[in-house]
Image (cartoon, grey):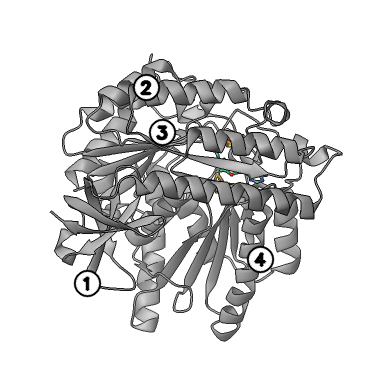
Amino acid sequence: MYQEIDLDKIDIHADPPLEEPARQYYFMAKCRKWVKGFEQRNGRLPKSCVLNFGCQMNARDSEKLSGILKQIGYILAEEEDSADFCIYNTCTVRDNADQRVYGRLGHLNSLKKKKPSMKIALCGCMMQEPGTVERIRKSYRFVDLVFGTHNIYKFAELLAEMFEQDRMIVDIWQSTDAIVEELPAERKYPFKSGINIMFGCNNFCSYCIVPYVRGRERSRNPKDILQEISSLAADGVVEIMLLGQNVNSYGKNLEDQMNFAGLLREVEKIEGIRRIRFMTSHPKDLSDELIQVMAESEKICRHLHLPLQSGSTRILKEMNRRYTKEEYLSLVERIRRAIPDIALTTDIIVGFPGETPEDVDETIDVIRKVGFDNAFTFLYSKRTGTPAAAMENQVEESVMKEGFDRVLKVVQDTARKRVALLAGRTMEALVEEENEQDPSLMTGRLANNILVHFPGEPSLIGQIVPVHLREYKGFYYLGERM
Ligand code: SAH
Ligand code: SF4
Ligand code: F3S
């Protein structure tokens, strides 16, 4: 019901309501008034730009920020240069994510010097780290608003405060139990969407900062999730991606008896949804029931992202992953037996403290045995506050890089070989966009997440069409529509 609310009917001279999301709609109405004032002064509407630095969950958060900005009257822009308001939604999973943000902040500073009325906000995972906020207060004083992951639903309220005050506003919460439903979101693609099914993470893999910056695991109510997906389907969405740091433990804190396999069964029934994806699966919690649901499903994509991290049982133990090399391999075997055509992708970390070249050999052994369709390989990055950061046996950079190059080579060779096997087949592709380099080509995504470029018209965007996979170009296909 909130999606259809008329902001102009809200009395902004009354006290703000205490309950959510009514309170945020009140502040949206207030911000709308500010935007109208801007329009009167400048003869145009203000532009805003939300840039995303992190994972799919961050991307979905950015869509929620954009949804609020659109509701209050901002024009949404893709790049910072013409924007009156820039928001960086940050990630801190590895140090290079932090460095990208600091690098671009310099650029924002020079833009703001030219246009002092410009506003700048920083939010997301990086802001949950006390050291970062201190650094911003000290060295990046041109920033207007800083908030974190737990209070993102309060964006409208924080904006209203920003418009009224001329100092840096910092609002970071250490945790929250709240899940605020029914706030607007502006999708990047009209035909596909991510949906949060849970927030936070309880796993505490010893290298990982996510549980510290995203808080404890909380599942959304199935009713809210299913309602959201139904209304997305009614709005033309055909593909959805269920999002959580560990979707396989969905439902653990809920009163309703619902696990992830059960949720998928319900999602499958929603008319209009043609493809279902999810991310991310932790191998330790992947149940046989889930494998069965996937095998029986007509809509769940034949693709599973199953982060391995390491193939060495000793390192896995140090990482607190709670499975062994053999358990991972036997899980893959069970999955492949039930769903033979499934594409498997993974994440691998090289250079975890204490990792030896022999441990890297174990990882390479798993890559060869499984034959991943794709693998994201990362150099270990020390995250302050995690148990691994305090380990004494940190691996030297040159050794790390050597292992990384070895892993990458095997990953690329095996992925190429596996994906090349699809040549000559005809598969369904969801047409996503025009090809950037060659506008006569359209780009579609296969169920296994591989891209295919083929001659076609932009009118196909959003449709699922059969495409003949003619030529494999290493990580993508050239094809023809059948
Ligand atoms: N919840 C997901 C992963 C989220 S982070 C899961 O458990 O699989 C995405 C990926 O970043 C991880 O799978 C891991 O491979 C990588 N990663 C996380 N922390 C890292 C670190 N400190 N250094 C290098 N890579 C890291
Ligand atoms: Fe990080 Fe592990 Fe949680 Fe994934 S499961 S977010 S790697 S702690
Ligand atoms: Fe990064 Fe936060 Fe996602 S740290 S990977 S944006 S949960």
Check if mark 1's residue and mark 2's residue have beta carbons within 8 Å.
no
Q: Which residue is mark 2?
A: 337
The residue singled out by tag 3 in the image is 197
Q: Left or right of 140: which side holds 370? A: left
User: Is the residue under label 1 in contact with that under label 3 (CB below 8 Å)?
Assistant: no
Q: Quadrant of residue 473?
A: bottom left
- The residue beneath circle 4 is 102
Q: Nearer the viewer, mark 2 or mark 3?
A: 2
x, y (%) of residue 388? Answer: 76, 37
Residue pictured at 67% horizontal, 29% vertical? 316
Q: Amino acid at mark 4?
A: Tyr
Marks 4 and 2, the one that precedes in the sequence: 4
- Between residue 336 and residue 234, name the one nearer to us: 336
Query: How many angstroms separate mark 3 from mark 4 (CA)?
Result: 31 Å
Spatial separation of the CA atoms under disc 3 and disc 1: 38 Å
Q: CA distance from mark 2 to mark 3?
A: 28 Å
The image quarter containing residue 256 is top left
Q: Quadrant of the N terminus?
A: top left
Q: Nearer the viewer, mark 3 or mark 1?
A: 1
Q: Amino acid at mark 2?
A: Arg
Residues 378 and 8: in front is 378
Q: Report the residue at 33% width, 28% height from top.
A: 340
CA separation in Å, label 1 and label 2: 40 Å
